[in-house]
Image (cartoon, coloured by chain):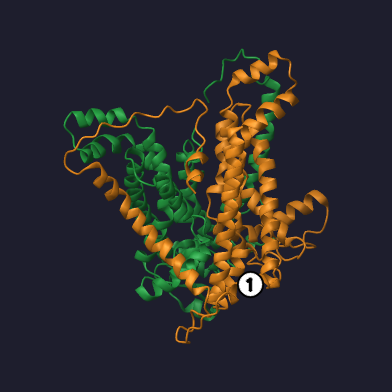
Amino acid sequence: MTDTSGPVVIRDRAGAVPAPPVARVIRGLSDRAIAWLFIAPTILLLLAINVFPLIWTIRLSFTNYRANKPNVPLRWLGLENYTSILADPDVWQAMQATAHFVIWTILLEVLFGFGLALLIDKKFRGHSFWTTVILLPMMLSPAVVGTFWTFLFQPQIGLFNYVVAFLTGIDPSSFQMIGDVPLAPWAIVLVDTWMWTPYVMLICLAGLRSIPNYIYEAAEVDRASKWRQFWSITLPMVLPFLMLAVLFRGIENFKMFDMVNLLTSGGPGSTTELASITLKREAFEKWRTGYSSAFAIILFVTVFGAANIYVKALNKVKQR
Amino acid sequence: MSGRTGAHSVVEPSPLTRRIAGALVICYALIAIVPLLWIFVTGFKTPPDSIAYPPKMMFTPSLEGYVNLFTTRSRQSPEYMASLPPAETWYDRLARSRNMVIAGPSKYGQRFVNSLVVAFGSTILAVSLGTLTAYAFSRFRVPLADDLMFFILSTRMMPPIAVAIPIYLMYRSLGLSDTWLGMILLYTAVNVSLAVWLMKGFIDEIPREYEEAALIDGYTRLQAFYKVVLPQAATGIAATAIFCLIFAWNEYAFAALLTSGNAQTAPPFIPTIIGEGGLDWPAVAAGASLFLLPIVVFTVILRKHLLRGITFGAVRK
């Protein structure tokens, strides 16, 4: 666990020189007292609102507890919740939908985001203004974004359907982005890509700007083609940044709830029912608190484990 | 940005390349901004205009969406409408032109106030706690510092719904459900990890020599922190605060599950604005526009620090 926190930081390639330790002056409160005084409130808050609930969730996950029937005697189920989750076809369906969503959004966002970053790095006139315009969608409330995309996706009257019909000539009421089973998984991918491409772009841009120019100059002297320069200089040097962007997007989209819940609420049927939406149904509609606690733990362990493995890989890439 | 050489460098893109790159980026930007503009424009349409086919690009602007957003109305018979005294205000007139009578203010204003209180309350708390903690991690040798920092970050990996289950039970027994205090504490806990990580980066960049000089001048450690470090970190604190503010402002999952009335914020409320026969799109669009506008302003203010904020300080420019 120790090696996963610090090294994720990618600093300017100039490299920071560690500052010498501050001379200790013992007056008033000791430094150690101040350190703990400053850290304790944060840790206590996190213990109260994150760790304590997590432990509570673990405990509940072994029981048949239902939050809407608190007076039913609590029965200890052992691992029964866990085994029934892993055998539940609905859960696997949700995991599949989540995988589809995570993989496609990351793929498209990396493609568009990296492409845009390469273009913006050419520094055309007005690039900083247009960059700010492009960044807007990712700052918005996902819930509000989900709501207004349902409007754009309305069959017949929606702007999206109208534009697609205008460009392709098909009937705008012949397809429903959020009502048709084959289209709905792509509708959520589309909206997420629209919203989060700027995120990948911004991080890639930082990567591109961290590459010192003299490397390209040396490559020019060696008569390396532009194509070769891209594969041997640009891509490897941006890779750590790109991987970091993928890590953050991966975690966020694995947890995705708000935007998709408002756009499709998991429908039609359960085609876009991502893991978090299933979790919400189980916990707050069916009130199977014990069962959903077990599911929550499984999800958390999955994210946590995958992120840890990924960070190890990221550190390897950075050390190359 | 360092390392860029002058215009004569062999690696500078040619003017033509620049122009093509610019054209492509502007195309993307224009397409990407259409959905946002469309929502903003829809807020000024009348309900019939908003659902017209083909979608109307040209229309007479109307404030009906905004009136519907802020009021509740009831439909009345023409006889009853005729018996009323003449409308006193422009919004009364607007409502009556649709055979409606304004019954009172809607809940949007109150939801908006809730959003403001919860967002600002949690931001102030999270940034204060985060700055103190980041200072301690930055300047003192803390045992298990890396583990603690990672623990602080890992609290963000839980899916919000997963955390919401025990929080729901905990708040129910403590009487914190659907209260400002409950939401402020919850958002503070979520934001404090971001605040610690961001502020650690900002404080790391302040040279220690400043504090050393102050300590030699006879300041205590706390005075040095208060009078030297805090002013130096002001930009970082402001940027961190805006990020926390945006998160709390935008948050939906906890708000939807843990609040229902008193403390409900705007994001779970906006999708429920119902008109006659489904959603009242101009009112929804008006509500969304008002809600998104502050974020657009903040994004423009923040653009220099965005990168740091969205990567928890992992990437610094």
Colour assigned to chain A in the rendering is orange
- Where residue B123 appears, as percent x and y from the top left, is 37, 52
Please state if A118 lies on the left or on the right of B66 as rendered.
right
**Dot 1: few (<14), some (14–19), or many (≥20) neighbours within 10 Å?**
some
Q: Residue at x 25, y 30 (%)?
A: B212
Colour assigned to chain B in the rendering is green
- Where residue A60 appears, as percent x and y from the top left, is 49, 74
In the rendered image, the quadrant that contains the C terminus of chain A is top right
Q: Residue at x 62, y 14 (%)?
A: B9
Please name the residue that numbered disc 1 is placed on.
A85
Q: Is residue B245 visible?
A: no
Q: Please tell me whether residue A312 is drawn above or below residue A218 in the rendered image.
A: below
Near-viewer residue (B24 or B123): B123
Q: Residue at x 69, y 69 (%)?
A: A270
Q: Residue at x 62, y 33 (%)?
A: A238
Q: Please tell me whether residue A105 is drawn above or below residue A213 in the rendered image.
A: below
- Where residue B211 appears, as percent x and y from the top left, is 26, 32
Q: Is residue A121 visible?
A: yes
Chain letter of disc 1?
A: A
